[in-house]
Amino acid sequence: MKKQQRLVMRTVILLVLLAAVGYTIYANFFTEKQAVAVGTTAPDFVLTDLKGREHRLSDYRGKGVFLNFWGTWCKPCEREMPYMNELYPLYQKQGVEILAVNVGEPKLSVEKFAERFGLTFPIVIDRQDQVLNAYNVGPLPTTFLIDKNGEVKKIITGTMTKADIQRHLESIKP
Amino acid sequence: MKQVKCECGHVNPHGTAFCESCGKPLEERAGKTLLDMRYEGSARRSQTYKRTFIDQIWAFFSSVKVGVALIVITLIASAIGTIFPQQMYIPPNVDPAKYYKQQYGWAGKLYYELGFNNLYGSWWYILLIALIGVSLVICSLDRVVPLYRALKRQGVKRHPHFLERQRLFGVSHVSDLDKTMAVLKERLAARRYHVREEDGHLLAEKGRFSRWGPYVNHIGLIIFLIGVMLRSVPGMYIDRVMWIPEGETKEIPGTNGRYFLKSEKFIFETYEKGKDNEVFNAAIDRVGNGMIAKNYQTNVVLYKRVGPVIPGAKPKLEKVKEYPIRVNEPLEFDHYALYQVDFRLNEPKAMSFQLADKQSGKTFGTVTVDLYDPKELYNLGHGYRVELLSYFPDFEFDEDGDPSTKSRVPNNPAFVFKMYAPDRPKGEVSFVAIQQTIEPFGNNKYKMAFVGLETRNVSGLTVRRDFTLWILGVGGAIFMIGLIQGMYWNHRRIWVQRVNGELWIAAHTNKNWFGLKNELRRLLDGTGVNMPADQLEEGKQAGQGGQAHGHGTA
């Protein structure tokens, strides 16, 4: 009888300890450090593009959004830009928007860059790093694939080939 | 369950070394060796029941050897982590894989490959700390319960074998046993002993609570570890860095867009001769005038965002307060604290140029370019105007030899200007960088002459919110209380018994035998009772081995 009690007691204490250790390890290594995780709703934001038009993410509900964070000095960003530009008209017709968020550079630099590559998709500038903070973007380029319900489907860091981009655009068609 | 019944009638759990009540040794060993008084001879449960899987795990963690091994491994690992700098202390813009190899050769490469560059945050390091915590809990539980039981149940009257096998033991013949006992009882009580009497035998005890010291200490340590664990719970602990230039308003990271900060001014002051108190003169002479930092300060305005938080939208801000942040004087609000930790002086903010005729030196107006948000067109009047074609904040030539920028920070600004004048209606192009001008399309009539640089200071602040601090404080305080309790008090016991018309005295303490002996000497002075002999010392002097008992401190 007493032995039984002791076994229960030991089991309970060990389970509590295991839970504490397990949680610590889990919280430190298996939860996404990013504020925005795959499967969650992408945080809403409002930013102004080069033509002065406001873009609010939640206005794109019902469409897929290819959200690309970039900088003019970033060579990998520069490499994927022409591919995005090429595929944009085709997929815009099919309900997928490309939105490029520049990480707070001078408007002049961004305009000259857009002119140089003849970019047609909307480019917004995050002057105060607010959106950068909300999405906790580290290295550039980082791309968030957002589906028609506003849910983050995939987070891609690093440069993409044309085939990659096409595949990703395809995956968020409404 | 096997239990052992002592001849005094007390039933002891299996594995007990000597009877809980009368102290008669239950496991008779050859010779008259001293009793091992650790844990009062109680049966540590982990050592007696190892039947199920749970019991085996329990037994593993309850072993002090395992605990010590865990601590030693953690110590060695922690030491290795200090050989080369941790990754957070190497320059942020370098590839750690290359950095360690370049700086420290093959050892650095190995260090990086084995993951020591991020040691204190690695899963196995955290697991080691957690296992130490588990070991602490189980070790303590496994010892404190039987110890408490044994001390609570100890009888006054002890078996003669128990007495004669104590380290301090003596036999005396006194003329009047009753009178001597009465005197001793009185003297013991006067020395703040708690005296119990049974059938004319005495047990005097004091400082028993010191035995709980180590366990109180462990409880403090466990609370401390719980506090550390809670740091990984989202929202409990925030530690972020924020760089803010003078004149700018920025979102405070870690506040989810709810707070904004404006920096009015960064102030850096040094000790100067003549201005400061004369007592500093000697030090100023030694180090140099204006070389000793006196104050780092950022004057800020704190704003709270009103209305819903939508990142990117121009926030509606409500002023909360103005505050000068100085070292150790953080701005505190809503459980957050902003600390002054770093600064950069004289960061380029704007550059001014004059449009000038190269030959005559005549100027036609000044152009000021904001390095963070330059305008494209600058009209100087009278048909003179300048167009900024390209801007490179952190200029370099890229792999293809084209001008480009390394980052968005204006560390090394460069510009491509197109200058229009009445006599140059099509414009002339000039590439202007620091200390360098290139005219890509031949000789120009005009140039952009550098006239000035506007700079500003940037403050580095730490954003901190810590809901675990009070837990760490409570844990630390309990830790100290336990330490003091165990270190500054001793648990002393003195047994005085009548055995066959003789007076037997035995004494035990968990530490400080010297003190106990002094106390006994004073106690017995003039009573005609012999001072008990230290059997351990005698044994050593007689050159007899085998008595090296660990008179532990638990």
Image (tube, rainbow, N blue to C red):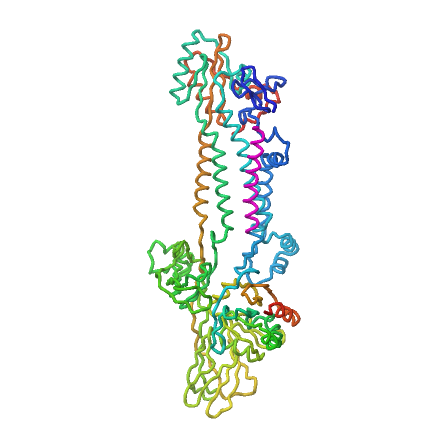
Q: Nearer the viewer, residue B440 or B291?
A: B440
Residue A3 location, quadrant: top right
| Tally of numbered discs | 0
Q: Nearer the viewer, residue B545 or B154?
A: B154
- By secondary structure, the bulk of the magenta-drawn segment is best described as helix
Relative placement, left or right, of B195 versus B159 is left
Position in image of residue B475 (x %, y %): 46, 41
Q: Looking at the picture, does residue B80 appear above or below residue B204?
A: below
Residue B293 location, quadrant: bottom left
Q: Is residue A24 magenta?
A: yes
Can the viewer see residue A142 in this picture? no
Bounds of the magenta segment: A1-27
Instruction: Name the outermost residue toward the bottom.
Output: B423
Q: Looking at the picture, does residue B485 appear above or below residue B403?
A: above
Position in image of residue B176 (x %, y %): 43, 7
Q: Is residue A140 magenta?
A: no
Position in image of residue B443 (x %, y %): 54, 88
Can the viewer see residue B373 in this picture? yes
Position in image of residue B117 (x %, y %): 59, 54
Picture quarter with the N terminus of chain B: top right
Relative placement, left or right, of A151 versus B288 is right
